[in-house]
Image (tube, coloured by chain):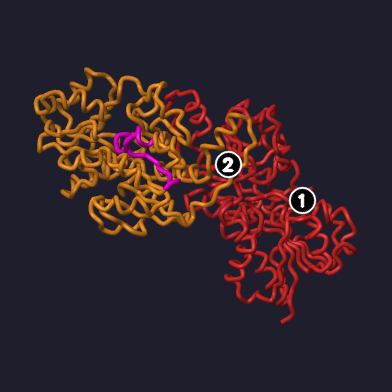
Chain colours: A red, B orange
Amino acid sequence: MSALRLHIQNPPHDPVFSFTDQQWRAALGRSPDMDFIEVSISNDAREFDEALEKAEVLLTWVNIVRDRLRAGDLQRIAPRLRIISCNSAGVDRLAPFDWLPSAVTLLNNSGIHSDKAGEFGLMALLMLHNQMPRLIKAQAERSWNAVHASTIRGRRLCIVGMGSLGSGVARRARALGMYVIGVRNGAEAHPDCDETVAVSELDSVLPRVDDVLLACPLTEHTRNLLSRERIAKLRRGARVVNIARGAVWDQEAICDALESEQLEAVFTDVTVPEPLPASHRLWGTRGMIMTPHIGADDQERYNDVTLDILLENLRADRAGKRLPNRVDPEKGY
Amino acid sequence: MSALRLHIQNPPHDPVFSFTDQQWRAALGRSPDMDFIEVSISNDAREFDEALEKAEVLLTWVNIVRDRLRAGDLQRIAPRLRIISCNSAGVDRLAPFDWLPSAVTLLNNSGIHSDKAGEFGLMALLMLHNQMPRLIKAQAERSWNAVHASTIRGRRLCIVGMGSLGSGVARRARALGMYVIGVRNGAEAHPDCDETVAVSELDSVLPRVDDVLLACPLTEHTRNLLSRERIAKLRRGARVVNIARGAVWDQEAICDALESEQLEAVFTDVTVPEPLPASHRLWGTRGMIMTPHIGADDQERYNDVTLDILLENLRADRAGKRLPNRVDPEKGY
């Protein structure tokens, strides 16, 4: 079997998420059928240029693709490149995709976040239902203020986006007895949902749910999807969780709705911009819990699972099958 | 069928948890076979005295039992009383039980907290694993500090006490892929645990778990169960959740272990004393999340479920069966 040249380009300085030789060997240990791959790993810009002359497959960060490949003449820089694999699930920073030759396949890292984001999204729902925004404030003020709450069991949750993140939350929320309505491009059934509706029907779903969780990719179709008008359609006291992208909702309208108490509480892992400036109102808005875009990343297992997902795709490629993580440039995910 | 006289005594002022006629009628609607019960409901002290002259069953608050019944001559005050039902799961405030005539059965409200406490305990575990103590601090400081974490899936959880609270957490933690070791009086298997051990073996379990969750009743056997010596047996970086009683652990030793970073993070819903004075170190100890004893109480459903549990016991009583919520005065729960 002929060799396949894979290059992994790390950022110059990232001690946490940089791939190591050891991780690569461990991944091959889990996929011994893939030992025909010749790998090079670097975090040096000059070595990157040299590697691109020969590499057929590249695994790297979306920002490196944007800065080094999208900006230039890809076929001249990397004449043999067939597959670009990004280690993030979202590739919205590479859109529009007119820079991508049709002979080159772009892969995202969808699936990497399912367990971690599923747990994180469930935690966010539990925290909002248990009145943690008020309880956290009370602790900070050293004030013993009992605030009672009820269960998430029996509540109605609308999840926008039933990909890897959304289904990871849906599965867990249903295990705890929530009724889950999944919002998808089409209305086809989903095994982790009690009900699915097409995104075109979103307006009719919003008034009848207790919670909304945003878990869709950011595309031109989902930008400002949870708009000021749609937030107003939610029942008073509803709760919203955002583990998608900050631009999927109207961030100012969310803050307004918290201040007017139309929304009871909100949890977001994403903001516009990121990092969020210290002066931004979102940090201190009543009822808001904010985390710095960490919810979906499993530090311990991230690189291992990333390599497993890449190898699964390369296995499909070798077998002439559809690559499960292929990004459709038309859709943007 | 002869009538049964039930009196429900509410506290003088408790708009949240006081029982109402409407709740009683709704409970009878769910248990139409129990319509032979004659009920009186009051929050007045003089009406209470009158009702006690005739009542066979009393449903009330543990503090009312302590102040009005435990202190006096029960057989004189309430000559016909056969069953005292407390609306709390823990009745440690009534111990020792030498005031209780052998002809009177004491019932607790065990089972009331299973769903709410199960969700709350799971939330606590997720918050500690997701580094929420550090992330909450960062939000308060308006500081965009990424702190990454891993999943609870695959971690080992030791639950001390496999009653209603413990099993409520165990079931949910296992649904999310945790390995659950239940600690019980005996070592008999439990359907919600991967493994059970007797409390006498606790010392051998502590070094091999990632998390400990306390969910046992407070008795003379469980007081200071998680002592300073036992905390030292936990692996460095372990996490502890307490939804039992503050006296079940060594509260000062827990704070010390957080400050020395032997423990990564701790979540407690219970303290000594309650309410906790504003000057107490626990409020501000690094890595500590504290809530004011609200985790197990489901405000919306509490009275409905309490009445259902009482009626289930009265049904067993009428049928001459064992009352499921009977407190064993020897054990204290």
Q: Is residue B249 magenta?
A: yes
Q: Amino acid at mark 1?
A: Asn
In reply to whether residue A271 is colored magenta, the answer given is no
Residue A26, percent across and down?
58, 66
Q: Work out which quarter of the rendered image holds the N terminus of chain B and state it.
A: top left
Upstream in the sequence, badge 1 or badge 2?
1
Q: Which residues are magenta?
A: B236-255
* Crowd tier of the residue under label 1, counting other residues whose Cα lies within 10 Å: few below 14, some 14–19, many 20 or above: some
The numbered mark at residue A211 is 2
Q: Nearer the viewer, mark 1 or mark 2?
A: 1
Can residue B138 be seen here? The reply is yes
Residue B67 location, quadrant: top left
Q: Nearer the viewer, residue B253 or A231?
A: B253
Kindly indicate whether the residue at mark 2 contacts the one at mark 1 (C-beta within 8 angstroms): no
Q: Label 1: which residue?
A: A63
B252 is higher (above) or lower (below) than A246: above
- Residue A266 location, x and y as percent? 60, 36
Identify the residue at image location x=87%, y=53%.
A71
Indicate the amino acid at tag 2.
Asp
Per the image, label 2 sits on a secondary structure element best described as strand
The local secondary structure at tag 1 comes to: helix
